[in-house]
């Protein structure tokens, strides 16, 4: 299925436009195979927040703080990536920085139109996708994506906040902010 999804993605005209756009490629993108399960110690493990925390604690700033703050949230165990290939920006779009959640929605809509696609094809990531992408890129290349910016995800925390993450000096940091909140480093990483 992953091979078939790869072929479909590479035939998509909007993806080809993105790849051929020299200005877009200056920003930096990563091609990542998203897997709902992975193998660790010979065992199949669901790709969720709790398992990434358990199996890669060295990559996180403060594991115990993340567990105590988010263990009651539905996404803690239930959110898993869908089997697919993803093309993701390694830092937030510069034009999305310093804007709140709704303003960022407008930016992603304009971004999608630029590449002649619909907003549904280019999405804001779920927390698990952004986290998984960060772990995979670090495991393979030893590089830290989101080290200069903060990705505001689509994952809801409580009833009013959204989860965000970045790769700080001490590792991956996960937090949440209100829909109306903005910050000069916070923006959106489009995911194709």
Image: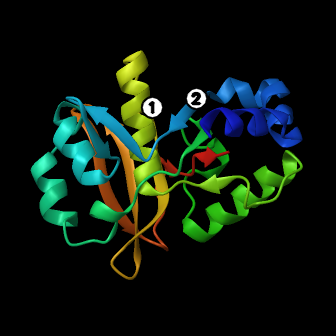
- The extreme bottom residue here reads 159
Residue 85 falls in image quadrant: top right
94 left or right, relative to 55: right
Quadrant location of residue 58? top left
Labelled disc at residue 145: 1
Q: Residue 147's quadrant in the figure? A: top left
Residue at screen point 41% across, 19% down: 140
Observer-nearest of 111 and 55: 55
In the rendered structure, the answer to whether residue 14 lies left or right of residue 74 reads right
Question: Could you tell whether 125 is left or right of 73 in the image?
Answer: right
Residue 49 % position (x, y): 29, 52
Quadrant where the N terminus sits is top right
Check disc 1 and report its element: helix, strand or loop: loop
Can residue 192 be seen at all in this image of the molecule? yes
Q: Position of residue 104 (x, y in %)?
A: 63, 61
**CA neighbours of label 2 inside 10 A, class few (<14), some (14 to 19), many (20+):** some
Query: Against 71, is 139 above or below?
Result: above
Q: Give the residue displayed 70% in from the left and 52% down from the top.
A: 122
In the drawing, what numbered circle is on residue 96?
Answer: none
Q: Are the residues flagged by discs 1 and 2 in contact, CB closer than 8 Å?
A: yes
Element type at marker 2?
strand
Residue 82 % position (x, y): 52, 51
Q: Is residue 150 placed above or below 41 in the rendered structure?
A: below
Q: Nearer the viewer, mark 1 or mark 2?
A: 2
Q: Using a 10 Å C-alpha cutoff, classify the residue at mark 1 as few (fewer than 14 neighbours), some (14 to 19) or many (20 or more).
A: many
C-alpha span from label 1 to label 2: 9 Å
Give the answer, above or below, for where 33 lies relative to 50: above
Identity of the residue drawn at 45% across and 31% down: 145
The residue carrying mark 2 is: 30
Q: Is residue 151 left or right of residue 176?
A: right
- Whether residue 64 is situated above or below residue 24 in the rendered picture: below
Q: Residue furthest top?
A: 141
């Amino acid at each position: 299925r992953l091979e078939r999804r790869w072929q479909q993605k590479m035939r998509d005209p909007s993806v080809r436009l993105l790849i051929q756009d020299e200005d877009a490629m200056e920003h930096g993108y990563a091609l990542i195979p998203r897997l709902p399960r992975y193998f660790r110690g010979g065992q199949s493990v669901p790709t969720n927040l709790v398992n990434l925390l358990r199996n890669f604690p060295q990559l996180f700033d403060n594991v115990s703080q993340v567990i105590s703050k988010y263990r009651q949230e539905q996404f803690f165990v239930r959110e898993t990536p869908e089997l697919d290939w993803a093309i993701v920006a390694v830092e937030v779009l510069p034009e999305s920085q310093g804007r709140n959640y709704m303003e960022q929605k407008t930016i992603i809509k304009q971004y999608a139109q630029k590449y002649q696609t619909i907003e549904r094809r280019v999405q804001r990531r779920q927390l698990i996708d952004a986290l998984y992408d960060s772990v995979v890129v670090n495991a393979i290349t030893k590089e830290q994506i989101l080290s200069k910016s903060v990705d505001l995800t689509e994952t809801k925390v409580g009833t009013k906040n959204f989860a965000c993450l970045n790769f700080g000096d001490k590792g991956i940091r996960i937090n949440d902010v209100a829909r109306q909140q903005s910050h000069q480093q916070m923006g959106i990483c489009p995911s194709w």
